[in-house]
């Protein structure tokens, strides 16, 4: 792994973060990460708890959920992304995380790291980056509509102190879409694996037609 921090990592680490988060990322997650795949080594709660406690005799870190809380903060600034099958309300011990800023961005996206800003009413996600992030996160349905963008904008307009790069905003939007795809209220849907995917009208019509044909055939035989 490249020991030099990328410019994107430096920018994210300078965001409002606790020092414990920085320790977790720099000493706990990054050293053994694979720069080609941006995957961390399997999470080892015991090792990370020892790292975070250091020589503090009171050992304030005792449970895996405390590690998860720090990971959540790292996710919020774009330093960590969760594979689709993981969520921080459950254990991630033995699982791998994604460190999307670990590798230098491709030239197409490099400019998206240059400028940081708060959310604006006319913000739109970078489509090419969103599709790449969606693939990285394992999102099957990569479509999104104006309502989903509007909800995202409305949420972050209420948090004007949150300042991120265009890369990070699109990354956060991709994570938001991932959560929506896993939500029970996402409709119209068709289950593909563990995800709920929008179903095209043509597919629905074909399925309904097939059921009608099967019903008619069964009635005719009887």
Image (cartoon, helix red, strand yellow):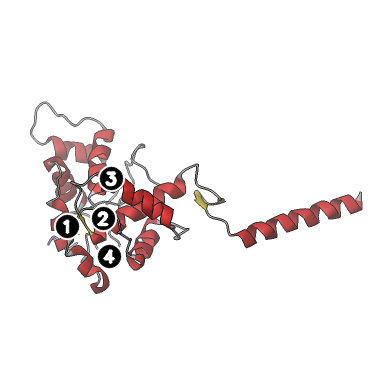
Tell me the mark number nearer the camera, choosing from 4 and 2: 2
Would residue 5 be seen by someone viewing this image from the given angle? yes
User: Crowding near pointer 1: few (<14 within 10 Å), some, many (20+)?
Assistant: many
To which residue does mark 2 refer?
120
Between disc 4 and disc 2, whose residue precedes?
Answer: 4
Answer with the quarter of the image where residue 9 lies.
bottom left
At 65% from the left edge and 57% from the top edge, which residue is drawn?
Answer: 204
Q: Position of residue 107 (x, y in %)?
A: 23, 73
Q: CA distance from mark 1 to mark 3?
A: 20 Å
Q: Position of residue 3 (x, y in %)?
A: 13, 60
Tell me the mark number nearer the camera, choosing from 1 and 2: 2
Above-or-below relation of 41 to 184: below
Answer with the quarter of the image where residue 103 lies.
bottom left
Q: CA distance from mark 3 to mark 4?
A: 18 Å
Q: CA distance from mark 4 to mark 1?
A: 16 Å
Answer with the quarter of the image where residue 53 lies.
top left
Q: Nearer the viewer, residue 99 or 161?
A: 161
Q: CA distance from mark 1 to mark 2?
A: 23 Å
Q: Nearer the viewer, residue 192 or 197?
A: 197
To which residue does mark 4 refer?
36
């Amino acid at each position: 792994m490249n020991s030099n921090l990328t410019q994107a990592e430096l920018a994210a680490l300078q965001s409002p973060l606790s020092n414990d988060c920085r320790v977790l990322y720099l000493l706990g997650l990054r050293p053994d990460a694979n720069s080609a795949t941006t995957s961390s080594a399997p999470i080892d709660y015991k090792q990370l708890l020892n790292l975070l406690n250091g020589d503090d005799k009171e050992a304030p870190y005792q449970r895996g959920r405390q590690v998860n809380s720090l990971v959540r903060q790292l996710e919020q600034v774009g330093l960590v992304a969760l594979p689709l099958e993981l969520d921080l309300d459950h254990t991630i011990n033995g699982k791998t995380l994604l460190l999307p800023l670990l590798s230098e961005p491709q030239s197409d996206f490099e400019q998206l790291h240059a400028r940081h800003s708060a959310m604006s009413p006319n913000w739109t996600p970078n489509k090419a980056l969103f599709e790449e992030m969606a693939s990285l996160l394992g999102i099957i349905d990569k479509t999104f509509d104006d309502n989903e963008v509007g909800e995202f904008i409305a949420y972050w307009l209420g948090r004007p102190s949150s300042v991120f790069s265009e890369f990070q905003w699109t990354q956060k939007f991709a994570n938001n879409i991932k959560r929506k795809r896993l939500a029970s209220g996402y409709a119209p849907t068709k289950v593909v694996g563990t995800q709920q995917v929008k179903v095209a009208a043509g597919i629905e019509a074909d399925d309904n037609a097939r059921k009608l044909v099967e019903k008619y055939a069964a009635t005719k035989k009887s």
